[in-house]
Amino acid sequence: VAVIDGSVLRSSDAIIDRILQMPGASPEIDQELDPFDHPQSTNLLRLERVLFSTWLGWLCRGGGRSDFERTLRKVEDSLSENGGPFFLGERFSLVDIMYTPFIERAVASLAYFKGYNIREKLMFPAINRWFDAMETRSSYRATKSDYYTHAHDLPPQLGGCQAESGGEGVRKAIDGGDWQLPLTESIEPEWSWISPREARLEAAERILHNHEAVARFAARAK
């Protein structure tokens, strides 16, 4: 919810639409991100809402896999039809920004709770090209999260997620149930854009910053 010029806006779509109509500090960026001059933008944003709904339907209520798969196939086809790698072809826009949080969470949560792998490149080549293109952007790399975080953050936010037996192996791989040190493989696609040295520095910084929470977690009772 946001109040802009006295108007109460209750959806992210309405908030973004209003902000795009306001003069910004960078008109060039405003124009580049604005997707509404593209004839397919409205349909793509409607499809994003259906994707969100069918994802939650399967994740939280246990049924609805076929609805989600039909919707995901439409997303795959939309990316292919426009030539990719982004939803409006080579042009990165607000459409990509709107899809990002839900596709990223769907990938992690459905792998963990259902054993469903959206990052299978042969099955979803256009979606995976989209992820590859997004990961070239420093703004996305700075906000991208990992499977463990999404899998454990979502249940308290959504009131629970329905785990299926197909995800048991993924849950063990993510939670450490079958880890063997030193770790050599990950269930997640490779984070090849960050070097091992950068990863170690970031991990050290996060541990130092959150040392009290880390200590509580490490000392939790079994």
Image (cartoon, rainbow, N blue to C red):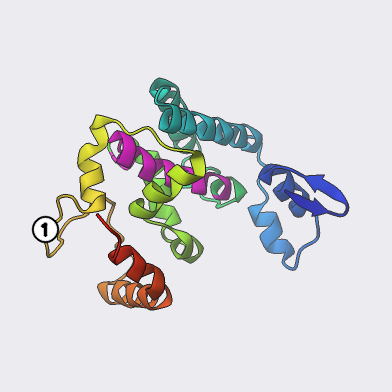
Q: Position of residue 103 (x, y in %)?
A: 45, 43
Q: Residues within 10 Å of mark 1 (few under 14, many from 20)?
A: few
- Tell me if I can see residue 62 in this picture: yes
Please give left or right for residue 170 compared with residue 103 in the image.
left
Front in this rendered view, residue 184 or 56:
56
Question: Residue 40, located in which quarter of the rendered image?
Answer: top right
Front in this rendered view, residue 54 or 212:
212
Question: Residue 164, located in which quarter of the rendered image?
Answer: top left
Q: Residue at x 24, y 32 (%)?
A: 166
Please give left or right for residue 20 compared with residue 203 in the image.
right
Magenta-highlighted residues: 97-121
Judging from the image, what secondary structure is the residue with disc 1 in? loop
Q: Residue at x 38, y 49 (%)?
A: 152
Q: Is residue 215 above or below residue 187?
A: below
Q: Residue at x 28, y 77 (%)?
A: 197
Front in this rendered view, residue 38 or 163:
163
Please give left or right for residue 17 compared with residue 162 in the image.
right
**Which amino acid type is shown beneath numbered disc 1?**
Gln
Q: Position of residue 1 (x, y in %)?
A: 72, 48
The residue most toward the right is 6
Q: Kindly identify which residue carries mark 1.
A: 180
Q: Position of residue 10 (x, y in %)?
A: 73, 43
Residue 205 belongs to magenta span: no
Please give left or right for residue 216 compared with residue 70 in the image.
left
The quadrant the C terminus occupies is bottom left
Residue 112 belongs to magenta span: yes
